[in-house]
Amino acid sequence: MGRWHVNVEGRSEPQHLESPDWLHAVGRALRLVEGWASLEQVSVVREGTAILVRSGDRLLCRLEPQDAPAQTDGQRLLARAGALLEQAQALVPAQAGAVLWAEGNFLRFLTVTGSRAGQLTDLRVPAHVGVAGWVHRSGQPRVEHTGGGSGRHNRTVDRLTGFRTDVLVAVPISVGAHHLGVLELVNPEAPVDRSKLRELTLLARTFARWASTLRIAEQVG
């Protein structure tokens, strides 16, 4: 029998449950959500050791096993970066995506989706080149159409992986002048207008505010 610490939408005080497994715990936690019986669709995702239960954009509840070992800041960063990328691709469906994290004079592919994810994860690229480098330095979002080989796109990664980038959407992960990295979406399914770009920028900024509170004294991974 496991013990779970549960934060429920609309309740200021955390709840505590005992359940034989995580699925049973999710079922019990859902019953604590006001109006749970009328929910049409619910999704369950993992974020590190935690379990998040959502309905659309609503976070209904968050379950954390009470006997789980404490996560390092690096582990928490990886988990939240994965969640950021999932949210971004729900907002702007794309062929691939990545969160690049600043490490000195480099940007590291911290978490990656798409067919070349295995080749790119942990790859480091110079922080001063390409669209990602421009966005990282300037703190401004950018949509780059790469046809004809013009513009800021650095094709080194494409040549390395055999992937073809036609459109690259990049937004800064930054808080004020403190630039932490870049969120990228590659070959979106539909044109990205200013409204979508603003929403992506807001997602990245919210993540940056959280990430800026971490004290990462070790290499992430």
Image (spheres, rainbow, N blue to C red):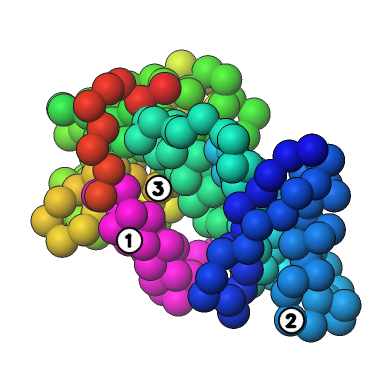
- The picture places residue 39, in percent across and down from the top left corner, at 83, 76
Nearer to us of marks 3 and 2 is 2
Label 2 element class: loop
Position above or below: 16 against 196: above
What residue is rendered at 65% in x and 57% in y?
A: 16
Q: Is residue 121 left or right of residue 73?
A: right
Please, what is the dominant secondary structure of the magenta stretch? helix
Which numbered tag is attached to residue 213?
Answer: none
The answer to which image quadrant residue 191 occupies is bottom right
What residue is rendered at 75% in x and 62% in y?
A: 29
- The picture places residue 56, in percent across and down from the top left corner, at 69, 69
Label 3 element class: strand
User: For the residue carrying disc 2, how many other residues have a C-alpha within 10 Å: few (<14), some (14-19), or many (20+)?
Assistant: some
Mark-to-mark CA distance, 1 and 3: 10 Å
Reply yes or no: does residue 211 show up in magenta.
yes
Q: Which region shows up in magenta? A: 191-212
Q: Is residue 37 left or right of residue 88?
A: right
Closer to us: 34 or 124: 34
Residue type, numbered disc 2: Glu
What residue is rendered at 27% in x and 22% in y?
A: 218
Asked whether residue 172 appears in the rendered view, the answer is no
- The picture places residue 50, in percent across and down from the top left corner, at 60, 45
Which numbered tag is attached to residue 183?
Answer: 3
- Residue designated by label 2: 34
Residue type, numbered disc 1: Arg
Asked whether residue 27 appears in the rendered view, the answer is yes
- Residue designated by label 1: 205
- The picture places residue 150, in percent across and down from the top left corner, at 33, 42
Q: Is residue 188 left or right of residue 32?
A: left
Closer to us: 14 or 142: 14
Q: Is residue 85 left or right of residue 139?
A: right
